[in-house]
Amino acid sequence: MAQEPTRQVQFVTKVSKFCNLRCTYCYEFAELDRRERMSREQLHRMYVHLRDYYVDRDREDGVRTQLHIVWHGGEPLMIEPDYSWRTLEDQRAVFGDSLRVSNTVQTNLTLLDDERLRLLRDGFDNVGVSLDLFSGLRVNIAGRDQQATVVSHMERLRSEGVPFGCITVLTRKNLGRVVDTFAFCQKAGLGFRACPFSRAPTPTSTRRTTSPCPRSFPP
């Protein structure tokens, strides 16, 4: 039996810039204290537009679209879990059986209480954890390295059976430890992805960028 042709489409959704870290490679410091967020209504409207567009495209092209929505920030878990539960409920109502949809959250994993753990386990389909094991790049507003907290929370995810993968932003400071980071993830049975960081020139300035890499590879 022939396999149904599929189209894979990924949307990175930055619902808020609000973040509790000040990673040394970040180029959005001026916006990380902004608490504005996309409203439930705006997200609902986005789902409707995506459904209407891809259902029509699928009919014309004879394929089935798989939507991958990646929840990004800022730090998505800074927002109360009810926000995510409600929009995921709206998603199911809008898409129904018309499109296949997965939801991945990219988190720094510095915040993990029981409600957020339940959201990661039962709400999202995939979890990506931003990781820097050796270089002290991921610090809070006071400049203190948060990686020990992240590793502790990773252990809690593992003990609760929540699958996740890891992403490390590669900079000059940690480039020499990428093999060690990979070895750590390999030993732990975790997916791993490296996200290169560079200073990319623009016509009027030099700005820091990271290439888009919102999802972790599976183990």
Image (cartoon, rainbow, N blue to C red):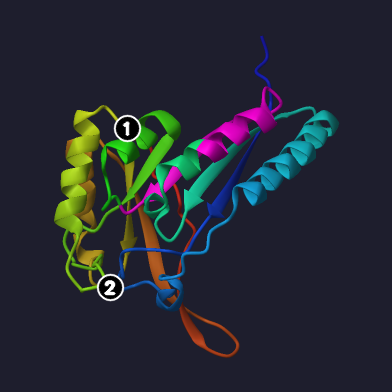
Q: Residue 34 placed where, x, y %?
A: 46, 69
Q: Which residue is mark 2?
A: 172
Quarter-of-image position of residue 125: top left
Left or right for 8, reference 70: right
Tag 1: amino acid? Pro
Q: Residues within 10 Å of mark 1 (few under 14, many from 20)?
A: some
In this view, which residue lies farthest toward the right? Answer: 60
Identity, as a three-letter code, of the amino acid under mark 2: Arg
Q: Residue at x 26, y 45 (%)?
A: 112
**Range covered by the magenta-colored residues:** 86-108
- Residue 216 rendering spot, x and y as whole percentages: 39, 45
> Is residue 86 rendered to the left or right of residue 112?
right
Q: Residue at x 77, y 33 (%)?
A: 55
Quarter of the image that includes the C terminus = top left
State how many labels appear: 2
- The image quarter in which residue 68 lies: top right
Query: What SS does tag 2 mark?
Result: loop
Where, by quadrant of the figure, is residue 73 drawn? bottom left
- Mark before the other along the chain sequence, 1 or 2: 1
In the rendered structure, the answer to whether residue 163 lies left or right of residue 153 reads right
- Does residue 195 sit above or below 28 in this rendering? above
For mark 1, give the secondary structure. loop
Mark linked to residue 163: 1
Q: What residue is at 42 percent from the left and 64 percent from the top? A: 18
Residue 125 shows up from this direction: no
Is 99 above or below relative to 133?
Answer: above
Neighbourhood count class around disc 2 (C-alpha, 10 Å): few under 14, some 14–19, many 20 upward: few
Check the image and report above or below for 10 versus 177.
above
Residue in the picture at 60% in, 47% down: 40
Residue in front for this viewpoint, 34 or 167: 34
Query: Viewer-proximal residue, 151 or 58?
Result: 151
132 or 176, which lies in front? 132
